[in-house]
Image: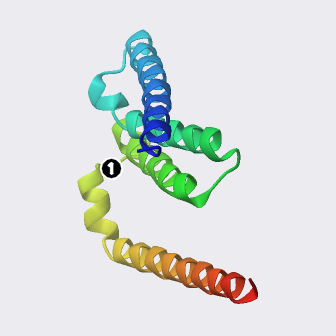
């Protein structure tokens, strides 16, 4: 049971940071006159920032366990904000229909990079075990 306490504190740190950021986003949206339909993409971005900060507090450094999911959430947040705030002149549906071949290509590149990183990490772990 000693692992429960650190997880609870990590979760509370994440939630507290997320709630502060989400409140700030909601108030900023209200002040600027944006609807919830326009500011919703910033909430996953706030979750990404909260996850990154929670990981920094836990490990005292940037680790892939927290950084990669957090960065993905922040990037998705920025992507969806382009459509939600009408920065791009097309709807998300039109974008997906126009650029659908690029979506599987990005997924394959991400998968290949993830597999390469996993194999590298596994190989390094094997070398470390062999030395000790």
Residue at image x 67%, y 83%? 129
Q: Residue furthest front?
A: 1
**In terms of image quadrants, where is residue 120?**
bottom right
Instruction: Answer left or right for 47 relative to 54.
Output: left
Asked whether 20 or 8 is in front, the reply is: 8
Asked whether 38 or 40 is in front, the reply is: 40
Q: Please tell me whether residue 10 is drawn above or below residue 63 in the rendered image.
A: above
Q: Position of residue 29 (x, y in %)?
A: 40, 18
Residue at image x 47%, y 18%? 24
Residue at image x 55%, y 85%? 119
Q: Residues within 10 Å of mark 1 (few under 14, many from 20)?
A: few
| The N terminus: image quadrant | top left
Instruction: Answer left or right for 116 relative to 86.
Output: right
Instruction: Answer left or right for 70 relative to 85.
Output: right
Q: Please tell me whether residue 72 is drawn above or below residue 3 in the rendered image.
A: below
Q: Position of residue 83 (x, y in %)?
A: 36, 44
Q: Please tell me whether residue 91 is drawn above or below residue 23 in the rendered image.
A: below
Residue at image x 39%, y 74%? 107
Asked whether 40 or 125 is in front, the reply is: 125
Q: In what element is the residue under mark 1?
A: loop
The number of numbered discs placed on residues in the rendered structure image is 1
Q: Residue furthest top?
A: 31
| The C terminus: image quadrant | bottom right
Instruction: Please give the residue where the numbered disc 1 appears in the rendered image.
Output: 90
Coloration of the structure image:
rainbow
Q: Please tell me whether residue 30 is drawn above or below residue 88 in the rendered image.
A: above
Q: Position of residue 85 (x, y in %)?
A: 39, 35
Q: Position of residue 103 (x, y in %)?
A: 36, 71
């Amino acid at each position: 049971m000693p692992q429960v306490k650190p997880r609870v504190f990590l979760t509370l740190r994440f939630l507290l940071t997320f709630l502060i950021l989400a409140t700030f986003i909601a108030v900023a949206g209200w002040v600027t006159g944006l609807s919830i339909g326009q500011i919703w993409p910033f909430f996953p971005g706030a979750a990404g920032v909260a996850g990154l900060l929670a990981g920094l507090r836990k490990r005292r450094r940037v680790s892939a366990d927290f950084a990669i999911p957090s960065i993905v959430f922040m990037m998705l947040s920025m992507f969806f904000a382009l459509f939600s705030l009408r920065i791009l002149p097309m709807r998300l549906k039109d974008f997906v229909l126009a650029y659908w071949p690029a979506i599987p290509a990005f997924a394959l590149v991400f998968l290949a990079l993830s597999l390469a990183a996993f194999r590298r990490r596994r190989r390094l772990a094997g070398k470390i075990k062999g030395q000790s």
